[in-house]
Amino acid sequence: MIGNMFKTTRHKRFDYKPRFFDPVQDELEERIKSKEFTGLNDRAARRYRISDGIRRNQGHSSIRKESTMRANLTIAAIAGILVLMSVLLLGNLGG
C-alpha cells in the first residue's frame, strides 16, 4: 500500500504508424468521384461541381487574391460612377 503511494505512473506508449498522403492522388480520386457523380440529375451535379471548384481553389492564394482584387475594383468603379452621377445630378438641380 505504501509502495503504491510513491510509485510514479509510466508513460503510455502508442503504436503510431504515419500514413503517406499524396495530394495529387487525392485530387485525382476526387475528380474520378465527381465524374461518377454526374450520373445524377443536372442540378445536383452542378451543385457538386461548384462546391468542388470552390473547395479546390481555397488553397490557392493567388486565385483568391486575384478574385478579391477584381471584386474590389468592381466595387470602386460602381462607387465612382455613383458619385459622378450624383455630382452631375445635384449640379444640374442647383444651377
Image (tube, rainbow, N blue to C red):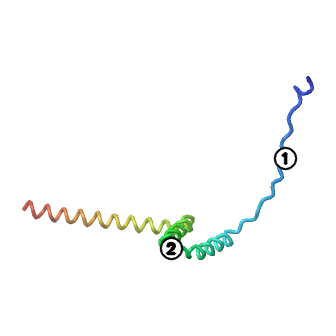
Residue 9 versus residue 62 in the image, above or below = above
Q: In this view, does 67 lie above or below 14?
A: below
* Residue 61 horizontal/vertical position (percent): 54, 65
Mark earlier in primary sequence (2, 1): 1
Percent position of residue 8, x then y: 86, 33
Residue at 87%, 25% in the rendered image: 5
Q: Residue drawn 56% across and 68% down?
A: 56
**Toward the viewer: 49 or 19?**
49
Identity, as a three-letter code, of the amino acid under mark 1:
Arg
Left/right of residue 3 with respect to residue 87 in the rendered view: right
> Relative to residue 10, is residue 66 depicted above or below?
below
How many badges with numbers are in the image?
2
Left-right relation of 13 to 45: right
According to the picture, the residue beneath numbered tag 1 turns out to be 13
The crowding category of the residue bearing disc 1, from other C-alpha atoms within 10 Å (few below 14, some 14 to 19, many at least 20), is few
Residue 64 in picture, x, y percent from top left: 49, 66
Dot 1: element: loop
Image quarter of the C terminus: bottom left
Answer whether labels 2 and 1 touch (C-beta < 8 Å): no
At label 2, which amino acid type do we have? Asn
- Identity of the residue drawn at 55% across and 68% down: 52
Q: Quadrant of the N terminus?
A: top right
User: Percent from the top left, x then y, of residue 78?
Assistant: 30, 66
Disc 2 and disc 1: Cα gap in Å? Answer: 51 Å
The residue pinned by badge 2 equals 41
